[in-house]
């Protein structure tokens, strides 16, 4: 991957749920052609951030530019042109139980792009092969697949439309360390082969180190550090140091019920 101009620019992003402020004047750049991992503990705002960027949540205030175009406040028919640039691997894969594997993979091709089913099946099988899934499982239900295979199917769905931007929501959650490494390697290969920009949210530092060019850490709704993955061990940021080393004592205070 090479350095590039910002593909996504977030400025002053705020989001609350009632009196609970989750994002607080957050700024973040995602460079074109780069893979950025946003790390942080549970409840720090990672998922809310990614949902605001892809349009599942409307922020209370702030700006989100994608390829220089403001997306906050866009009406649905205009936002669709933006979301067609996106592919996403959801936490837990989020496959539709009522559809066979190939239809899950082809979902965006059929529903968003209007591709004919026969052509979509061919494209789905190609995407499945790219992530190491044999075509003989195409007509199986997701329930017949292991957790790792479901993740692969979710990744195949994310890349099937050949998006410009890929989002990964906790891609290694629920996987053993070996399968987590396999999925991470597939993510790196998929992003590289597509020439895509990638944004991952994760609390798994081993995963972040494998897939990211750059890492940003979020805490209490703000980005507290952003830099190359190679520099994170010498970030000189006490919160980053505490998080990546898993220390219970430090500036990050967890609320633990007793």
Image (tube, rainbow, N blue to C red):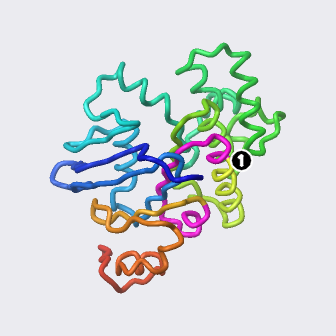
Q: In this rendering, is residue 227 above or below 33?
A: below
Tell whether 214 sits left or right of 242.
right
Question: Helix, strand or loop at disc 1?
Answer: helix
Q: In this rendering, is residue 257 above or below 56?
A: below
Residue in view at x 64 percent, y 27 percent: 106
Which residue is identified by label 1?
Answer: 149
| Depth check, front residue: 123 or 71 | 71
Q: Quadrant of residue 78?
A: top left
Tell whether 115 sits left or right of 48.
right
Q: Quadrant of the C terminus?
A: bottom left
Is-magenta flag for residue 195?
yes
Is-magenta flag for residue 79?
no
Residue in view at x 39 percent, y 83 percent: 248
Identify the residue at the far bottom of this view.
249
Tell whether 65 sits left or right of 99.
left
Residue in view at x 31 percent, y 47 percent: 10
Give, as a single range, the part of the protein colored magenta. Answer: 190-210
Q: In this rendering, is residue 81 above or below 216?
A: above
Q: In this rendering, is residue 238 above or below 51?
A: below
Q: Residues within 10 Å of mark 1 (few under 14, many from 20)?
A: some
């Amino acid at each position: 991957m090479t350095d590039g101009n910002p593909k996504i620019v977030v400025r002053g992003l705020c989001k609350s749920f009632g009196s609970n402020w989750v994002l607080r004047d957050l700024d973040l750049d995602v460079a074109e052609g780069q893979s950025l991992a946003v790390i942080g503990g549970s409840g720090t705002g990672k998922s809310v951030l990614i949902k605001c960027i892809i349009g599942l949540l409307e922020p209370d205030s702030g700006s989100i530019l994608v390829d220089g175009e403001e997306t906050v406040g866009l009406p649905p028919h205009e936002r669709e042109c933006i979301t067609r640039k996106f592919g996403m691997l959801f936490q837990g894969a989020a496959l539709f139980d009522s559809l066979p594997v190939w239809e899950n993979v082809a979902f965006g091709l059929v529903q968003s792009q209007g591709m004919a089913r026969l052509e979509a099946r061919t494209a789905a099988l190609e995407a499945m092969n790219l992530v190491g899934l044999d075509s003989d499982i195409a007509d199986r239900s997701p329930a017949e697949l292991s957790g790792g295979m479901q993740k692969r199917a979710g990744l195949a769905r994310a890349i099937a439309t050949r998006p410009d931007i890929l989002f990964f929501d906790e891609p290694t959650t629920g996987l053993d360390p070996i399968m987590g490494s396999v999925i991470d390697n597939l993510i790196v290969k998929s992003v590289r082969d597509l020439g895509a920009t990638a944004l991952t949210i994760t609390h798994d530092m081993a995963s972040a180190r494998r897939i990211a060019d750059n890492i940003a850490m979020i805490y209490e709704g703000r980005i507290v550090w952003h830099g190359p993955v190679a520099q994170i061990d010498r970030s000189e940021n006490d919160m980053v140091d505490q998080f990546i080393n898993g220390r219970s004592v430090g500036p990050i205070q967890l609320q633990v019920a007793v």
